[in-house]
Image: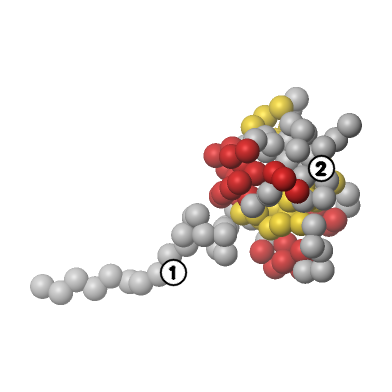
Amino acid sequence: MDLKLPTSEIIITNDTNSDPAGYYLVSTRWTMINDKSITFVRSKSLGYCYNLKWAGPMNKFDAEKANQSNKTTRIVSHCILKPFIAFLNNEMVLPNSPEVRKLIGLDSGELQLAN
């Protein structure tokens, strides 16, 4: 007996090229080494924030478009961030820990020290 199953596209949840939950832009310029949280670019590039709700998520096309001419931002998938997201003062933030910085590709030696 032959069994014929329909084929469908497989979405890999840890692949940053196909995250259905969306993407965020991390600011490498405004994330300071001694900040409690990672700094994100706000939706529609309206400044910077720590709160992930203000930062997106955005679809892949919009994230790539916003990042196209900017050398101080990085596109990061929601699926990569999800295990590290914390709630602080009723905001959804990403802790600025060495593990998180390594995960999103921030070099601790290049980050500025805030006063």
List x then y, in percent, for residue 2.
15, 74
Q: What residue is at 62 percent from the left and 41 percent from the top?
A: 100
List x then y, in percent, for residue 49.
82, 42
Mark 2 and mark 1 lie on one chain; the one further toward the N terminus is: 1
List x then y, in percent, for residue 37.
73, 35
Toward the left, the furthest residue is 1
Residue identified by numbered label 2: 112
Q: Is residue 60 left or right of residue 65?
A: left
The answer, for residue 55, to whether it is visible in the render is no
Q: What residue is at 72 percent from the left and 62 percent from the top?
A: 63
* Between 68 and 23, the one nearer to me in the picture: 68
Q: What residue is at 85 percent from the left and 35 percent from the top?
A: 114
Q: Is residue 38 left or right of residue 113?
A: left
Establish if 38 lies above or below 20.
above
Q: Is residue 3 left or right of residue 39?
A: left
Label 1: element kind:
loop
Establish if 31 lies above or below 20.
above
The structure's colour scheme is secondary structure
Between the residue at mark 2 and the residue at mark 1, the CA separation in whole angstroms equals 43 Å
Residue identified by numbered label 1: 9
Quarter of the image that includes the C terminus: top right
Which amino acid, by three-letter code, is at mark 1?
Glu
Q: Is residue 9 left or right of residue 75?
A: left
* Between 70 and 50, the one nearer to me in the picture: 70
List x then y, in percent, for residue 36.
74, 31
Which amino acid, by three-letter code, is at mark 2?
Gln
